[in-house]
Each structure stands twice: as C-alpha cells, then as structure tokens.
Amino acid sequence: MQITVENAGGCKRIIKAEVPADLVTSKLAEGYRDINKQVQFPGFRKGKAPKHLLEKRFGKEVHDDVRQTLADEAVKEAVDEHALKLLGQVELVEAGDIKGGVPLLITLEAEVYPEFELPEYKGIELERETPKVEEHDIHAELRGAQMQRGELKAKDGASVKGDFVRSNVRVTVGEEEIFAQERGLMEVGFGWIAGLKPAKGEEQLTGLKVGDSKEIKLKLPADFQKEDVRGKDAVIHVEVVEVLGFEGPELEELAVEQGHEGLDAWREDIRGSVLARKESDLDRTIEEKAIQKVADATDMELPHKFSERKAAELVQQQAYRMYQQGQPEEVIREFLEGTRDKGVDEVKGMLKRAFVIDAIARKERLVVTEDEIQREVGRLAQMVQRPVDEIYAQFQQNGTLGGMREELKTGKVLKMLRQKAKYI
C-alpha cells in the first residue's frame, strides 16, 4: 500500500492511500468467505452458496466492510511510516468503488497533536502574598460551632447587638456588582459585614427591622481578593429579610466541652487551622497563575474537531471536581445538562492549558498510577460515606474516571510549577 501524508495546515493532515489490485481482490474474497460460513441459502449446504448469490445479497455489506478495513490499515501504515500522533478518530473522506483486480484510492482526514515548543516553565517569577487570619475568620468559626448547639429564632422589632439579620446583600463598585448573596446571615454588633469592615461596623446593623434597606459606604482594602477594585469606593446594599435571636450555650462553655483550656486556647487552635486553609488556597492561586503564564507564552494552533471532543471531556473533568467538593448529584447533573452544547470558543483557553499540562507531564514523566486512582476513589468514598466499589462503578458508568486521572495528573504538574517558581 502506497501512503502519502499532506499537511493541510495547522493540525490537519490528509492521508492518501493507493491499495494494490491484488490486495483489494484478496480482501473481497476473504469477506465473501466469511459471509459464506455464516449464512445458508435454500438448496445449498452452509458454506457452499455460489458467489453470485452472495454478491447479490451481501455485496454492499462486504464492500463497506472491506473499504473500512483497508482504511484502517492505511491509517496504521501512515502512523508507522510518518510517525503521526493522531488525535481522535480519523475520518474517511473518499474511496472509489471496490472492484476485484482494480486498485483502490482512499482519502482520509486526520488531526494530529499540535506541534509547539514549551517555553521555560521552571523558575517562573510570581508574587506570593502572606496570608492573614482576620478576627472575623476566627469569629465565624466560633459562631458556626455555637450555632450547631443552639437555635436561631425569628423575633419582632428592631435588631440589637448579639442578634442576627438574614439579608439579601450586594456589594457594588460604581455600576459593577462584585458580590451578591441572598438571605445571607450576619451578626449584629460584630463589625464585619459581607466579609468587609466598614467604618462604625459595630453599629451599622443595629436597629434594623424586617423590610428595611440600608446602604453602607466604604473603601475596599488594599488586599481585596478582586485586584482590579482594590482601594476603590464601594457600597454594601442590605435588605433585611429576617431578624433572629440566638438561644444556646456560651462560647466559654463550648470551649471547655471541646477539650480546650478556655476560649483563648480554642481561638488559637482555630487560627492555626484557618491559616493552613488559607495557605492551601494560596497554593492553588499560585498554581493557576503559574500555568497561565506558561500557556500565555506558548504559541500553538488548536485542532478544531478534536477541540470539540476535548471540550466535552473538560466538562466531565469539571463535574468530577464538583463531586470532589461534595456538591449534590442533582447540581452536578444540572451542570452537565447545561454545558452539553458549550461552544468550543469558550473553552479554547482551557484546551491550550490542557495541552501545555500534558506536554509538561510527558516531559517530566509525571504519570498517575492505578494505585493513586484507587486511593482517590477510597478517599471520596469515605468522604460521602458510600462503599468504594459503588463509587468506582459510578465513575466508570458516567465516564468520570478519565476526569479523575486528568485531574490527578494536572495536580502533579501544577504542584511542580509552584515548587519550582521564583517568588519576588
């Protein structure tokens, strides 16, 4: 079989194969022999039907099978001879009529792995902030533990210090809304509102009743999570839905119950756990910035048809992340249904990132073993309190195992980039 491969631009390749006449004849004869062994015509013993009857009854099926078989062999030879790194399925574009004793020309269209050079990805210069544990972080943890042992009850009249208000909250900078939450719970007299500390914050929620609205002005802090609005004037919009009073144990009592010497010791324990969580969150932020820098510095042309298929895979990977975070199955199902027809253009940045991660993983020989898959399934099963075999079967059924493998591999690459980064 004579094979030629044409570069049709980008990742597209045209494979042309000229199949010798004797090979076409041999494949056709083989196809009819196989059919003859399987069928029986009236008046003929099984396997003894004349060729003209087989051709009349099964000619199209045999020709289609032979055409596909020869196309598959052409692809294999093209890969072997031209070292093609195929992406996805090869498409049969054109093939002439198959006739014994006549050569056959086959044209196929394929997409190959994008050819690109990785930029330097070790020693990327990045800024790393120092995480801080704020008073409201510790207070929120304390209050959360206290709420589990107590009860919030709706009350009439205006709010006083120590009460809670359930409110619809928005934070705006000019016309831009940077935060929104419905029925958010806030403590009256604490000073922090929607994670922000306005002037006289301890007084801002005092005296509010159901149905009241209030606008609280402040300047956003220099370390606000959304960098482009840091230091800008903002407004917290509060609409009170409910005023609640708390009935339950005091914090000092809970501290002793939980094995601490006192409230101060409990606060320090919480400070350490919150700091560890913030360090972990910061690591994830650093990793995303690192891979984005590498992707931005990488020049590549993405394969269009493969991009469509990869887009669907990336959606599955996101679904796994949602499961990992403990989100309800109905939420994940709605996400999958809502993103079923997501356009390729929306995920091209993710695709480029995925190709870069895959290239780094291959270069650094970062692989995910079956033991690592099993450990991760076991961890998730314990988290949701379901049998390991049940979780594994579910992941196999919905195709999430592939997303898990990709996520674990991605984690290894991102961790390496973070550890090798240069912090300024």
Image (cartoon, helix red, strand yellow):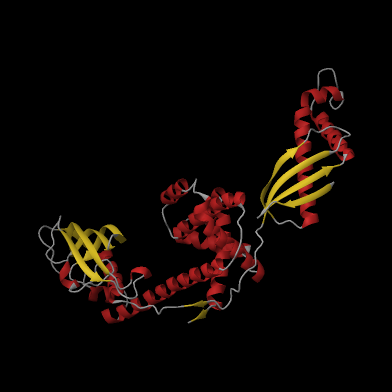
Whole-percent x, y for residue 128 in the image: 44, 78
Residue projecting furthest to the top: 43
Instruction: Work out whether residue 262 can be spotted.
Output: no
Whole-percent x, y for residue 261 in the image: 29, 81
Quick one: 400 or 336, which is closer to the camera?
336
Instruction: Work out whether residue 308 can be spotted.
Output: yes
Quarter of the figure with residue 239: bottom left
Whole-percent x, y for residue 280 in the image: 44, 73
Does residue 128 appear to the left or right of 366 in the view shown? Answer: left
Quarter of the figure with residue 194: bottom left
Quick one: 153 or 107, which is closer to the camera?
107
At x 37%, y 70%, the residue is 227
Does residue 117 appear to the left or right of 423 in the view shown? Answer: right
At x 54%, y 49%, the residue is 398
Quick one: 244 or 286, which is closer to the camera?
286
Position of residue 116 relative to residue 98, above or below, is below
Quick one: 347 or 65, which is closer to the camera?
347
